[in-house]
Amino acid sequence: MIDTVAGARFNTIIYRIVKTVIADNLKPYDYFEHMVTEIAKHLDDTTRNFLDGLLLDY
């Protein structure tokens, strides 16, 4: 996954998210589980407006 530029970028993004979650005293697994569950509820949305509320939700 890290042997390409895209893979390295993706890895960096995930690492930053995990470090931010930990800094906010949250559990990374629980955070990602919540995000994936909530995003799945919006698969038919034509905009990404729900993401703003998602950040305030958790």
Image (tube, rainbow, N blue to C red):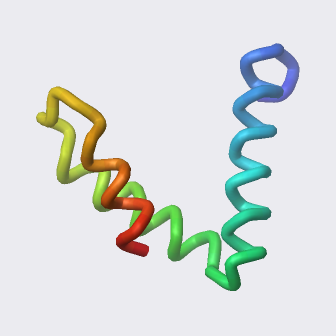
State the quadrant of the N terminus: top right
Q: Which quadrant of the view contains residue 21?
A: bottom right
The x and y percentages for residue 32 are: 51, 62
Where is residue 38 drawn, in percent x and y? 29, 59
- The residue shown at (51%, 76%) is 30
The quadrant of the picture occupied by the C terminus is bottom left
Foreground residue among 47 and 22: 47
Q: Quadrant of residue 44?
A: top left
Residue 17: name its quadrant: bottom right
Q: Is residue 53 above or below residue 1?
A: below
Q: Is residue 13 left or right of residue 39?
A: right
Choose between 19 and 50: the one closer to the eye.
Answer: 50
| Residue 15 percent coordinates (x, y) | 78, 50
- The mark total stands at 0
Q: Looking at the picture, does residue 40 appear above or below residue 35?
A: above
Residue reaching furthest to the top = 5
Q: Position of residue 5 (x, y in %)?
A: 82, 15
In the displayed structure, does residue 8 sit left or right of residue 51? right
Residue closest to the far bottom: 25
Q: Residue at x 82, y 15 (%)?
A: 4
Residue shown at the point (77%, 38%) measured from the top left:
11
Say above or below: 4 vs 49. Answer: above
Task: Please tell me which residue is depicted at 72% across the width and 61% down the height of the picture.
Answer: 18
Q: Residue furthest toward the left?
A: 44
